Image (cartoon, rainbow, N blue to C red):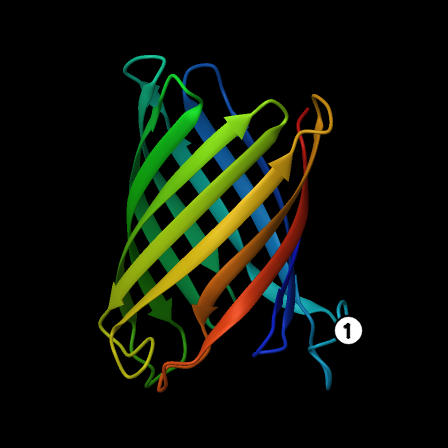
Amino acid sequence: MRHEWLDVSKVNKDRVAISHRFDNGFGFSLETKWKSGGDDQNKAFNDIVSNGTESSVSYQYKFTPQWFIQPGFTLESSESNSTYKPYLTVGHTFDNDIYLNGRYRYEYTRETKKGKDDVKTNRGEFWLGYRYQDWRLEYNYIYKHSDQVRFNNNKWDYEHNLKVLWNYDASWAPYTEVGNVSASKTTDQRQTRLRIGLQYKF
C-alpha cells in the first residue's frame, strides 16, 4: 500500500497492490487506486474517488543468478480511458549488492470520449539500487516521448525518483520516496512528489 502527495498540484493519491510470482517464472499483479476529491484535494482521504485499476502479467527468465529478462503486459483502466502497456525489462545484480535494471514500455491510451485523440507513448527507464543488510536505496529515472504535448510545450517528459526501504523483518518493509515530476504541460514548472508505503511479504 502507498500514499502520495504532490506539492504543486496539491493532490493526494493512494493505491493498494498485490502481486505473486510462481516458481516457473510467471507472475501477476492487481492494483486499485484512489485519490482525494471534493473541494479540497489537498486533504488526505477527502471525499475519496476511484483513480483507476491496473492488472499485469509477466514472465521472468533468469539466464544466470545475476541476469534476468522479463517481458510483460499491463492494462490500466479508468472511467475515461484504457491504457495498454507491453514492456520488456532486463536486470543485472552485481557481486557487491548493486543492481541495475532497465525497461522499455510502449503505452497506447484509448480514449472513450468522442473527439478526444488516443495517445501513444514510448517510455524508457532504469533503476540503480544498492542493498545493505536490511536497507535498500534505489534511484529511478524515467523518460517519456509521446505524440501529444507532455511538458513545457514539448512531446517529452522525464521523472527522477529516490526510494529508501527498510526490511523490518521477513514480512514487513516500510519505505519512502521523493520524486521530481512535471507540474504543467505548457511551462517548465516541476514539482516534488512525496510517497510513503508499506510492503508485506507472505
Up-down relation of residue 135 to residue 7 (above or below): above
Q: Foreground residue, 88 or 158?
A: 158
With 86 as the anchor, is 25 left or right in this view? right
Q: Quadrant of residue 149?
A: bottom left
Q: Quadrant of the C terminus?
A: top right
Residue shown at 61% from the left, 38% from the top: 165
Q: Foreground residue, 173 or 109?
A: 173
**Is there any visible trace of residue 79 in the rendered image?**
no
For mark 1, give the secondary structure: loop
Q: Foreground residue, 44 or 140?
A: 140
Q: Residue furthest left?
A: 147
Q: Quadrant of residue 84?
A: bottom left
Q: Mark 1 — residue? A: 46
Up-down relation of residue 86 to residue 77 (above or below): above
Where is residue 43? Give x, y as percent: 75, 74
Residue shown at 56% from the left, 64% from the top: 193
Counting labels gives 1
With 69 as the anchor, is 38 left or right in this view? right
Q: Quadrant of residue 156?
A: bottom left
Where is residue 197? Give x, y as percent: 67, 47
Where is residue 123? Give x, y as percent: 29, 55
Q: Foreground residue, 188 or 65?
A: 188
Q: Amino acid at mark 1?
A: Asn
Up-down relation of residue 174 to residue 82 (above or below): above
**Is there any visible trace of residue 96 in the rendered image?**
yes
With 122 as the anchor, is 114 left or right in this view? right
Residue shown at 54% from the left, 46% from the top: 163
Crowding near the residue tagged with mark 1, few <14, some 14–19, many ≥20 C-alpha atoms within 10 Å: some
Residue shown at 73% from the left, 86% from the top: 39
Where is residue 28? Give x, y as percent: 49, 34
